[in-house]
Structures are given as structure tokens and as C-alpha cells.
Image (tube, rainbow, N blue to C red):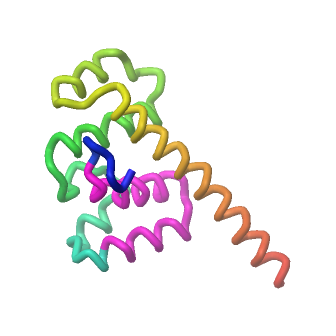
């Protein structure tokens, strides 16, 4: 995803941070917030990510793509072909949407595994 033809790599840590907040993945919240701070992202944007990604500093079409991916992820029942058509009008293909949705789904599962192993490690040490 770092070298995707249509998706800006700068979008990825914002999506990870948003999902980490939504899924209550503390380790991933801390990791991605720290990463964004190291890239001199405004702290207000980082602190307010849980309320949405409308203010992230990426191109408008990238922000809309991210919003549609999150919409599909968290509001599956209301996501329709119209949402895909909206992205096509912005120059994104079905594959572009699929690639970013797959990235987010993969992050969700990996972040869950990280939390499980961190908890196991903490509990076994206690």
C-alpha cells in the first residue's frame, strides 16, 4: 500500500489511528499517534481522530475515499453501489476501493491479535 498507484500512503496511519480508536486498540492508538506526531501532524487532528477523519491533511479525493471505506466497514447495510459510483467519479477504481478496504480489514485483525498477545503477556507475567 505504500506504493499504490491511486492511494496516498499518507492516508494509512490516519485510517489505522481511527480504526484503533473505534476498536479500542490501545497499543495501535499509541503507536499511530506517535508516528503521526513524528511527521509533524497537528496534534488537534490526532486528538480528534476518534470523531472522524474529515480534517486529516490529505487531498480531498483521498479523504473521501477513506470516508467511504470506513462507511463500508462500519455501515455495511447502508453502503451501496452509489458509494462506489461516487468514488469512480473521483478517479478511483473498484480495485482501489477493494485494496484500501482490504488494508483496513487486515489492520483490524492484526490489531486484535496484537491486543490479545499483549494481554496474554501481561497476564502471564502477573
The image quadrant of residue 82 is top left
Query: What residue is rendered at 30% in x and 77% in y?
Result: 37
In this picture, residue 108 sits left or right of residue 97 = right
Q: Position of residue 100 (x, y in %)?
A: 40, 41
Q: Position of residue 11 (x, y in %)?
A: 29, 54
In magenta stretch: residue 11:
yes
Query: What residue is rendered at 67% in x and 58% in y?
Result: 113
In this picture, residue 15 sits left or right of residue 22 = left
Q: Position of residue 13 (x, y in %)?
A: 37, 60
Quarter of the rendering occupied by the C terminus:
bottom right
Residue at the farthest bottom position: 126
Q: Can you say whether 44 is above or below 51 in the image? A: below
In magenta stretch: residue 41:
no
Q: Which residues are magenta?
A: 8-36
Query: What residue is rendered at 42% in x and 38% in y?
Result: 99
Q: Can you say whether 31 is above or below 60 in the image? A: below
Amino acid at each position: 500500500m505504500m506504493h499504490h498507484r491511486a492511494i496516498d500512503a499518507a492516508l494509512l496511519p490516519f485510517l489505522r489511528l481511527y480504526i484503533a480508536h473505534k476498536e479500542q486498540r490501545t497499543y495501535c492508538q499509541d503507536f499511530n499517534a506517535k508516528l503521526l506526531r513524528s511527521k509533524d501532524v497537528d496534534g488537534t487532528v490526532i486528538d480528534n481522530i476518534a470523531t472522524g477523519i474529515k480534517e486529516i491533511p490529505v487531498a480531498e479525493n483521498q479523504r473521501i475515499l477513506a470516508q467511504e471505506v470506513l462507511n463500508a466497514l462500519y455501515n455495511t447495510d447502508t453502503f451501496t453501489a452509489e458509494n462506489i459510483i461516487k468514488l469512480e467519479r473521483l478517479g478511483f477504481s473498484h480495485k482501489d476501493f477493494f485494496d484500501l478496504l482490504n488494508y483496513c480489514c487486515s489492520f483490524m485483525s492484526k490489531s486484535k491479535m496484537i491486543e490479545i498477545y499483549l494481554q496474554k503477556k501481561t497476564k502471564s507475567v502477573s
